[in-house]
């Protein structure tokens, strides 16, 4: 209780703490928070990490609750790189709906990196409570689905959920995002669809989406799922059959303005479908101009006979 009272007082008097001073309890020099702000303004990661570690988690938590957006922005930069950043999950989560879109978007990105499933050992090392992780994941999902939030914030939260997909595996993206009015959000949601089978109704709509970026992302999601082994299937067994309930995947890869990364992800489905039409589409791409798409198509076609 005393710890949180200290944090509240620190947040209210942050400006006063900028003057060089010595801690009356420890006798140690208190680093001015302005040092971190200057490093954040320059986007100097090494300096941000240096000053964040010297300030410590308690002062960063206090700054994350400050009323000054510039202070919060600097604190978020420090929270992202400080040693044991996962300890600050509960302090960053409330900032997801910060009134300043820049702060909210940054909070999404920082929280996604804190929850990154590639570092589960860090959460265990610092004994992060599972309910704090759950609150962070649910906060990202809520903001991603919020039509009242700025689009950049929602996009950042979708990307953060994808980055933290291991830690947030129990939190699924809202299906409504796949049909969002904004094509950028529809594409982001399809790119983040990495789990089970995409909803068939949404697939039919997305493959025919007038925005080629959305159709490409949906086609890539369909292909990812169709190439995933069925539950209980031994490693190396044939993949699940490709299904295209609406527009064919070969139509998508041949369409103009479909991102190359989506085309490359779809090509294995054409190679494994057994359809002569799919094979012809793959051969046409393999005979095209020099590009990563041509290289991948040529690789999948195999050596010429």
Image (cartoon, grey):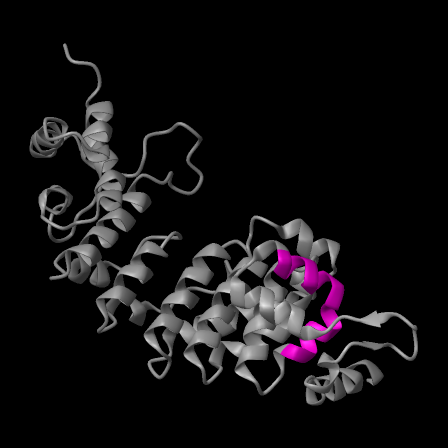
Please state the horizontal and vertical placement of residue 87, each as a whole percent of the image: 69, 65
Please state the horizontal and vertical placement of residue 201, each as a whole percent of the image: 21, 63
Kindly identify the residue that appears in the image at 68 percent across and 53 percent down. Answer: 122
Please state the horizontal and vertical placement of residue 217, each as a whole percent of the image: 25, 53
Magenta region: which residues?
A: 47-63
Secondary structure predominantly adopted by residues drawn in magenta: helix
- Asked if residue 158 lies left or right of residue 30, the reply is left
Kindly identify the residue that appears in the image at 75 percent across and 88 percent down. Answer: 9
Tell which of 3 and 247 is nearer to you: 3
Kindly identify the residue that appears in the image at 12 percent across and 41 percent down. Answer: 250
The C terminus sits in image quarter: top left
Residue 206 lies, with reference to residue 278, above or below; the image says below
Kindly identify the residue that appears in the image at 24 percent across and 30 percent down. Answer: 296
Please state the horizontal and vertical placement of residue 99, each as a whole percent of the image: 46, 85
Residue 97 appears in the rendering: yes
Residue 223 lies, with reference to residue 134, above or below; the image says above
């Amino acid at each position: 209780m005393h710890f949180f009272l200290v944090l509240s007082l620190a947040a209210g008097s942050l400006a006063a703490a900028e003057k060089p001073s010595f801690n009356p309890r420890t006798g140690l020099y208190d680093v001015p928070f302005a040092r971190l702000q200057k490093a954040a303004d320059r986007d100097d990661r090494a300096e941000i990490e240096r000053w964040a570690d010297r300030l410590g988690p308690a002062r960063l938590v206090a700054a994350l609750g400050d009323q000054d957006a510039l202070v919060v922005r600097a604190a978020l930069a420090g929270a992202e790189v400080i040693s044991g950043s996962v300890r600050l999950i509960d302090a960053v989560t409330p900032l997801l709906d910060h009134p300043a879109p820049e702060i909210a978007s940054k909070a999404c990105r920082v929280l996604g990196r804190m929850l990154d499933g590639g570092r589960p050992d860090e959460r265990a090392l610092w004994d992060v409570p599972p309910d704090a992780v759950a609150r962070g994941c649910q906060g990202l999902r809520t903001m991603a689905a919020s039509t009242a939030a700025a689009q950049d914030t929602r996009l950042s939260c979708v990307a953060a959920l994808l980055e933290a997909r291991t830690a947030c595996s129990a939190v699924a993206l809202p299906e409504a995002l796949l049909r969002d009015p904004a094509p950028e959000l529809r594409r982001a949601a399809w790119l983040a669809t990495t789990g089970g089978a995409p909803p068939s109704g949404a697939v039919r709509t997305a493959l025919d989406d007038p925005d080629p970026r959305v159709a490409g992302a949906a086609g890539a999601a369909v292909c990812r799922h169709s190439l995933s082994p069925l539950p209980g299937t031994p490693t190396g067994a044939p993949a699940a059959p490709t299904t295209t309930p609406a527009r064919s995947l070969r139509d998508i890869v041949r369409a103009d303005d479909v991102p190359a990364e989506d085309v490359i992800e779809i090509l294995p489905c054409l190679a494994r479908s057994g359809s002569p039409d799919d094979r012809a589409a793959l051969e046409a791409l393999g005979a095209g101009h020099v590009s990563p798409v041509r290289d991948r198509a040529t690789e999948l076609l195999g050596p010429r006979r």
